[in-house]
Structure formats: structure tokens, C-alpha cells
């Protein structure tokens, strides 16, 4: 064979905008077995995952879904899948009754294994030597051998898969690592919320959530940058730690608005004015400038409140791992006088921009023609829902999530007394995972006890709504639309002679 016919080793493709490759600065999800972690790709930045540290420099340029092996020095090497020959037969026993776990079946000691690691031998070779030096491996059944190999690979093979963030992956990650930050909302419950709320492109949605921005990010992903979302937030500003993990482009943020929850009553009463926004004690970072990335202090304070409300069940190390939202260096106050003056001017410009966005959100809410309402907060749902339903147009869905059933029962009763809603439904989803393997598929022994409750329904025009003077224009609009529709005429059926 000629030398010119030899092909060089494949190089990682050059990143192009819009492709499915990993770029510097992207948010990605690291996966190992059933463990997930969201991080941002940065050159020469050490990442710790499952008691191992490495750098993500070599992952830049590769496609999402690639699997890498951590080598010495923390560098990643692309791992190619090896096809096992189908004709290979394993030597296995019939049962495990004669196998005694006395700790003497393995000939390799811990010092031998450590020496192999120091020599730079890969985890796959270490697992193979463990199998060869085990005196009871061939006596085990085929299923027990697969279980043994899987256990040793998890311990000695440093393999990491890099995935593109999505609603399903991030919801599974949060529910497994820190469910308190998302109010113990399970991923199937979130899917039901998106379906019942009719989240789609082109909608005008209202969302009130205290789930670290996970519900907001799920809505933005489904809408695809088309339409508008008005987020109502308590406190000084919205927390969007999970929203930042999605890594949305800036075009997705043009239709995202925010409005303080404590100004909703004044908006309903007609007493809202621009001067009320200037009297706020602290202005949050604008959405366009920060891309949903607020300071770590604000995020950690809000997250600590969630954790305190749920109890001390979360590991502090995991909490630090989840707060991957970087702090904007522009928000730090400089020491020099010249730069300090620029910092003040930049801060004033951001406050004016934020005030302008608040006024735009107030104008959108004042139209009272939203296409849906999503509520998922740690607050009592009844006063929130009764106030926010006035901003929703008739024949539109609304969904309320709560970790407990009793607040939603009270909300159900209040809505029945108030009227203006139909098809009220209080539901709870039931989920159980299954192991699907050849000849041993069965439900898993451990399952989730509950993923929360949902109250859903549709808005309608009621008599009290038409009698409200503040909503007379809205009702007249619906009447004019009905008057424009011509009445259906009955057509005479001409009988044939046959």
C-alpha cells in the first residue's frame, strides 16, 4: 500500500455557529452512570466531578454526547466504543451457592492496584487484571459476572460523558442532587405542567416560580425564543441559576420580562406608576446584560432560604457544586476613582434599562390577555392564583404546582366559590422506574414517594368579570368579536329524483 493512502488520525472538527459541537463558554452537563452535574466550559479551569478533577480543554470542538476518559494530569481523551465479538462465549457457573465472600478471592492487594495506577495504566486494564486474578469470577453466574464488571468499572474507570443541557436532564439533576431548590418537583411533574399549560411558540405566558429558574428555563426551551414570558419574582430580583445552565442565546432573552410581585396589587387597582419602581431599595441586574446570571450572593441567599424551608437534607458540598453561575466582574466596585465613576454611570444605565423593562412588563400585564399562567412557588398558592388570574384571557389554561395537597384543596374550593374557571382538576403523577435487561427486567426496588401535586383548569368569562368596571373594555372587546361573527344559515337539502 502506498504511503499517500495512509489517512491521518481524525482531528476534532472546527466549531461553527449553530452546530452541535462544544464551544468555549458553553454550559454543559457532565454524566457518569446516573450522576449529573452542570458546569461551564472554560479553558484551564479545574472541574471536580465524582471525586476526580480534570480540565475540559480537550472537549472543545467535539460533539455533544461524546465520552471521554480522564488521563493523568486531568486531560480528557476521547474514548471510542469497542465492538465486542458476538461469538465470544463466557465461562460461567450455574449458581452462586458455593461462593463464600471471605475477602481472599482477589489476589491483587490495594498496594498492587495503587502501583498500577501510578504506572499510568488505564482503568480498563486494571479491571481486566482484577478479573484474571479473581479465583471466584469463573464460578459466578453470567449475571453476577456482569454485575461484578460493572461495579469495578464504576470504581476504576474514569469515564465522563458530556451532554447538551435540556429540561429533562437538568430536572433529573436537580431532583437527584438538590430537590429542595426546586420545591421537590419531579421531572415527570414538570412535563405535566408544560403539557397542561399549553406552552408553545408564540404564546404570551405569565410565570411565578421559586424553583431556581428551572420552570422558566423549561418554558423558554419549549417556546424556542418566540413569544413573550413575564416572570413575577419576590424580593429584590429573580433567581435564575437553573435558567443559566440551559445556555440560551441572547435572542431568547428579548421576549423575557420581569415584574416585582409586590407591585401586582397596584397594577390591578390601577394605581401603578413609574415612580413606584424608582423607590425600590435595590435594582436587579438587567436580563439583557447579565443573561440571567445574577451575583452569587443573591443566588446563595435565595437558595439558603429554600434549603432552610425544606430542612437540612442537602450536602453543603453539593450546594456549592450546583451554584455554577459565575459572578459578573463588572458588578464588582472598583477602587480607582476613574473606573469608579464609570462604574457608577454603568450602574445607573443598568437601572434605567431595568426600569424600562419593568414598564414594558407592566404594559403587557395591563393588556390582560395572557395565554396561560404557571405558578410553582413555595408560597401559598391561593392568593397568588386569585390575583394573577385577572391577567389571563378567557379560554386559557392555568397550572399551579405545590409540594403538598392541602393548599391546593383550599385553592380548589376558593376557585369554585369565585367562579370564572372550568375543568378544575387536582392530580398527582405516579412514577416508577424499571430495569430493562435481557431476562431480568423488573421494577426497581426503590422509587420516589411523590413528585408534588398539580391544580389545572381553564378560565372563562363570568358575570362578575363583565360587571367589573376595570374590565369593561376587555368584556366589550369580546362582545364585539362575537357580534362580528355572522350567524350560521341553514341550508336546504335539495332532494334528488332518484
Image (tube, rainbow, N blue to C red):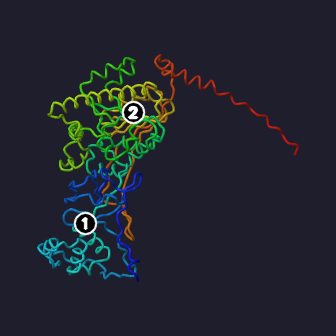
Label 1 crowd (10 A; few <14 / some 14-19 / many >=20): some
Q: Which residue is mark 2?
A: 230
> Is residue 68 found left or right of 315 in the rendered image?
right
Q: Secondary structure at mark 1?
A: helix
Q: Name the outermost residue toward the left.
A: 111
Q: Earlier in the sequence, mark 2 or mark 1?
A: 1
* Quadrant into which the N terminus falls: bottom left
Residue ID at (79%, 34%) = 492
Could one spot residue 153 in this view of the protein? yes
Of the residues tagged 2 and 1, which is closer to the observer?
Answer: 2
**Marks 2 and 1, Cα distance to the nearest angstrom?**
44 Å
Q: Name the outermost residue toward the right.
A: 497
Q: Secondary structure at mark 2?
A: strand
Give residue 65's position: percent from left, percent from top.
36, 60
Q: Quadrant of residue 480?
A: top right
> Is residue 297 found left or right of 7 in the rendered image?
left
Residue 472 vs residue 158, the one in the foreground: 158
Q: Quadrant of residue 444?
A: bottom left
Give residue 171's position: percent from left, percent from top.
34, 49
Label 2 crowd (10 A; few <14 / some 14-19 / many >=20): many
Could one spot residue 386 in this view of the protein? no
Q: How many marks?
A: 2
Please, is residue 137 above or below residue 200 in the view? below
Q: Which residue is mark 1?
A: 154
Please, is residue 158 above or below residue 473 in the view? below
Give residue 14's position: percent from left, percent from top.
37, 59
Mark linked to residue 415: none
Residue 416 vs residue 330, the one in the foreground: 330
Disc 2 to disc 1: CB gap under 8 Å? no
Give residue 410's position: percent from left, percent from top.
36, 32
> Is residue 110 found left or right of 473 in the rendered image?
left
Amino acid at each position: 500500500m502506498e504511503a499517500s493512502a495512509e489517512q491521518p488520525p481524525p482531528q476534532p472538527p472546527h466549531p461553527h455557529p449553530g452546530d452541535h459541537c462544544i464551544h468555549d463558554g458553553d454550559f454543559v452537563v457532565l454524566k457518569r452512570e446516573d450522576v449529573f452535574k452542570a458546569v461551564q466550559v472554560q479553558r484551564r479551569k479545574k472541574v471536580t466531578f465524582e471525586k476526580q478533577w480534570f480540565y475540559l480543554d480537550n472537549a472543545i470542538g467535539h460533539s455533544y454526547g461524546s465520552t471521554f476518559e480522564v488521563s493523568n494530569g486531568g486531560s480528557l481523551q476521547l474514548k471510542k466504543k469497542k465492538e465486542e465479538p458476538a461469538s465470544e462465549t463466557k465461562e460461567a457457573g450455574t449458581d452462586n451457592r458455593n461462593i463464600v465472600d471471605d475477602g481472599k478471592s482477589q489476589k491483587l492487594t490495594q498496594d498492587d492496584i495503587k502501583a498500577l495506577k501510578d504506572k499510568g495504566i488505564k482503568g480498563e486494564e486494571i479491571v481486566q487484571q482484577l478479573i484474571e486474578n479473581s479465583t471466584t469470577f469463573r464460578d459466578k453466574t453470567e449475571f453476577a459476572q456482569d454485575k461484578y464488571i460493572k461495579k469495578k468499572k464504576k470504581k476504576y474507570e474514569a469515564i465522563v460523558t458530556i451532554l447538551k443541557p435540556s429540561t429533562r436532564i437538568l430536572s433529573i439533576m436537580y431532583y437527584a442532587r438538590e430537590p429542595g431548590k426546586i420545591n421537590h418537583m419531579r421531572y415527570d411533574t414538570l412535563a405535566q405542567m408544560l403539557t397542561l399549560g399549553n406552552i408553545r411558540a408564540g404564546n404570551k405566558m405569565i410565570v411565578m416560580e421559586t424553583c431556581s429558574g428551572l420552570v422558566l428555563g423549561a418554558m423558554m426551551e419549549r417556546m424556542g425564543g418566540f413569544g413573550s414570558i413575564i416572570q413575577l419574582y419576590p424580593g429584590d430580583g429573580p433567581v435564575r441559576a437553573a435558567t443559566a445552565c440551559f445556555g440560551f442565546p441572547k435572542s431568547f432573552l428579548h421576549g423575557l420580562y420581569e415584574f416585582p410581585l409586590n407591585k401586582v396589587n397596584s397594577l390591578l387597582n390601577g394605581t401603578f406608576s413609574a415612580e413606584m419602581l424608582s423607590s425600590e431599595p435595590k435594582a436587579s441586574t438587567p436580563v439583557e446584560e447579565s443573561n440571567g446570571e445574577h451575583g452569587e450572593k443573591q443566588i446563595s441567599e435565595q437558595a439558603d432560604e429554600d434549603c432552610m424551608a425544606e430542612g437540612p437534607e442537602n450536602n453543603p458540598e453539593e450546594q456549592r457544586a450546583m451554584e455554577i453561575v459565575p459572578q459578573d466582574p463588572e458588578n464588582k466596585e472598583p477602587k480607582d476613582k476613574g473606573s469608579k465613576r464609570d462604574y457608577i454611570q454603568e450602574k445607573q444605565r443598568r437601572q434605567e434599562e431595568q426600569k424600562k423593562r419593568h414598564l414594558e412588563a407592566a404594559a403587557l400585564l395591563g393588556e390582560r390577555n395572557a395565554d396561560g399562567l404557571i405558578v410553582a412557588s413555595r408560597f401559598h398558592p391561593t392568593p397568588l392564583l386569585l390575583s394573577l388570574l385577572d391577567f389571563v384571557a378567557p379560554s386559557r389554561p392555568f397550572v399551579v404546582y405545590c409540594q403538598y395537597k392541602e393548599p391546593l384543596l383550599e385553592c380548589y374550593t376558593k376557585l369554585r366559590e369565585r367562579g370564572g374557571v372550568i375543568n378544575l382538576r387536582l392530580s398527582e403523577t405516579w412514577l416508577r422506574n424499571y430495569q430493562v435487561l435481557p431476562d431480568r427486567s423488573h421494577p426497581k426496588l426503590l422509587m420516589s414517594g411523590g413528585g408534588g401535586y398539580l391544580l389545572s383548569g381553564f378560565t372563562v368569562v363570568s358575570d362578575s368579570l363583565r360587571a367589573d368596571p376595570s374590565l369593561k373594555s376587555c368584556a366589550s372587546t369580546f362582545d364585539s368579536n362575537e357580534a362580528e361573527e355572522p350567524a350560521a344559515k341553514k341550508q336546504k337539502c335539495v332532494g334528488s329524483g332518484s
